[in-house]
Image (spheres, helix red, strand yellow):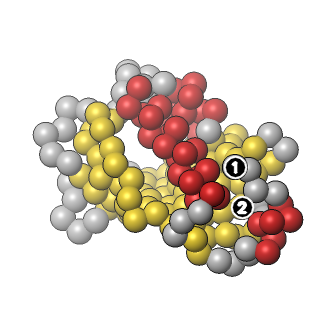
């Protein structure tokens, strides 16, 4: 279900823990994770704005860096997203925050981090413009 700008205007400054908009944005975020599992840099890049900024424990990353991590193939073996919530910033911007449990390629243990991703909508649909990863205490 695609919600209109007019509908989202009435939801401004709300935090959603369920509903069609949250499901739509989680589906998009899942496409990014699926690209990491598949090693598909093109699919990854299709989900990001040209001016994408990632803030990670390793530092900053632009769109090119996010996609280049897949040059040698998949970076993730598996993942699970939970504890999702969506903050309506404006009719065309939402902030998805969630807990990611994942196993990197070659990793023996599952790791956990909290992620916030800013999704912005234009005439062509929603794209991820910003993402910040926060490792949990005791993560690898």
The number of callouts visible is 2
| Relative to 101, 62 lies left or right | right
Question: Is residue 118 in view from this perspective?
Answer: no
The x, y position of residue 81, in whole percent, is 39, 53
Q: Is residue 37 above or below residue 82?
A: above
Camera-side residue: 70 or 88?
Answer: 88
The x, y position of residue 21, in whole percent, is 64, 58
| Relative to 107, 114 lies left or right | right
Determine the image quadrant of residue 90: bottom right
Question: Is residue 2 in view from this perspective?
Answer: yes
Badge 2 or badge 1: first in the primary sequence: 1
Return the residue found at the far left. 108
Determine the image quadrant of residue 135: bottom left
The x, y position of residue 5, in whole percent, is 83, 61
**Which residue in the structure is indicated by mark 2?**
93
Q: Which mark is residue 1?
A: 1
Which element carries disc 2, helix, strand or loop? Answer: strand
Camera-side residue: 24 or 72?
Answer: 24
| Residue beneath the point at 52% across and 26% down | 41
Camera-side residue: 3 or 98?
Answer: 3
Quarter of the image for the C terminus: give it.
bottom left
| Residue beneath the point at 51% across and 39% down | 32
Q: Is residue 84 above or below residue 30?
A: below
| Residue beneath the point at 65% across and 77% down | 14
Return the residue found at the far bottom. 13
| Residue beneath the point at 63% across and 41% down | 48
């Amino acid at each position: 279900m695609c919600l209109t700008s007019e509908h989202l205007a009435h939801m401004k400054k709300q935090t959603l823990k369920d509903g069609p908009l949250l499901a739509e944005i989680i589906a998009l975020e899942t496409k990014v994770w699926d690209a990491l599992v598949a090693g598909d840099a093109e699919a990854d890049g299709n989900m990001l704005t040209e001016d994408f900024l990632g803030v990670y424990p390793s530092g900053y990353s632009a769109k090119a860096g996010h996609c280049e991590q897949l040059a040698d193939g998949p970076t993730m073996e598996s993942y699970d997203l939970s504890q999702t919530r969506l903050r309506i910033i404006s009719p065309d911007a939402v902030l998805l925050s969630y807990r990611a449990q994942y196993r990197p390629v070659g990793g023996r243990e599952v790791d956990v981090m909290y992620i916030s991703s800013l999704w912005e909508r234009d005439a062509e649909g929603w794209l991820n413009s910003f993402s910040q990863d926060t490792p949990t205490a005791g993560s690898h």
